[in-house]
């Protein structure tokens, strides 16, 4: 289960995995429609989930 951190648009939102602080970008048709901050939801196989990290194999993020 994920908790909504921020709704970006009808098809994208930022969610936090329950009991962690790891943020994920979740994309899917209509996933953000009608969602509110702190609302819980389950991501299905048709949704794409990307983890948001501060560093990668190529180095730290640029500011």
Image (cartoon, rainbow, N blue to C red):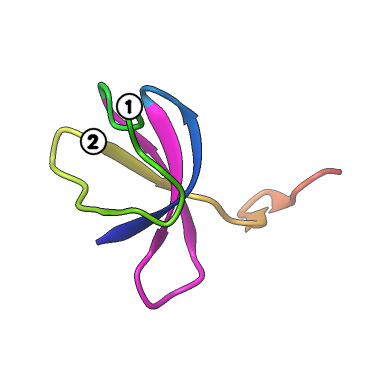
Q: Position of residue 59 (x, y in %)?
A: 73, 53
Q: Quadrant of the C terminus?
A: top right
In the image: residue 13, left or right of residue 31: right
- Front label number (2 vs 1): 1
Real-space Cα distance between discs 2 and 1?
14 Å
Toward which corner of the image does residue 18 lie, by quadrant? bottom left
Relative horizontal placement of residue 5, taking residue 40 as reference (left or right): right
Residue in front for this viewpoint, 55 or 44: 44
Q: Is residue 29 above or below residue 26?
A: above
Q: Position of residue 5 (x, y in %)?
A: 50, 51
**Secondary structure of the residue carrying numbered label 2:** loop
Please name the residue that numbered disc 2 is placed on.
47
What residue appears at the point 38 percent right and 22 percent down from the top-left corner? Answer: 10
Q: Quadrant of the N terminus?
A: bottom left
Picture coordinates of residue 25 (x, y %)?
45, 42
* Disc on res. 25: none
| 8 to the left or right of 40 | right
Q: Is residue 18 magenta?
A: yes
- The picture quadrant where one finds residue 12 is top left
Q: Is residue 29 magenta?
A: no
When the figure is inspected, residue 19 is found, relative to residue 40, above or below; the finding is below
Provide residue 20's location: percent of width, then percent of height: 44, 75
| Dominant SS in magenta | strand
At 15% from the left edge and 33% from the top edge, which residue is drawn?
46
Magenta segment boundaries in residue numbering? 12-28
Per the rendering, the mark at residue 33 is 1
Check disc 1 and report its element: helix, strand or loop: loop
Rendered residue at 32%/31% (across/down): 34
């Amino acid at each position: 289960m994920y908790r909504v951190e921020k709704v970006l648009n009808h098809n994208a939102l930022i969610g936090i995995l329950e009991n962690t602080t790891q943020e994920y970008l979740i994309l899917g048709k209509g996933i953000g429609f009608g969602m509110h901050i702190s609302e819980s939801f389950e991501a299905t196989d048709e949704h794409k989930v990307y983890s948001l990290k501060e560093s990668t194999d190529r180095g730290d993020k640029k500011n």
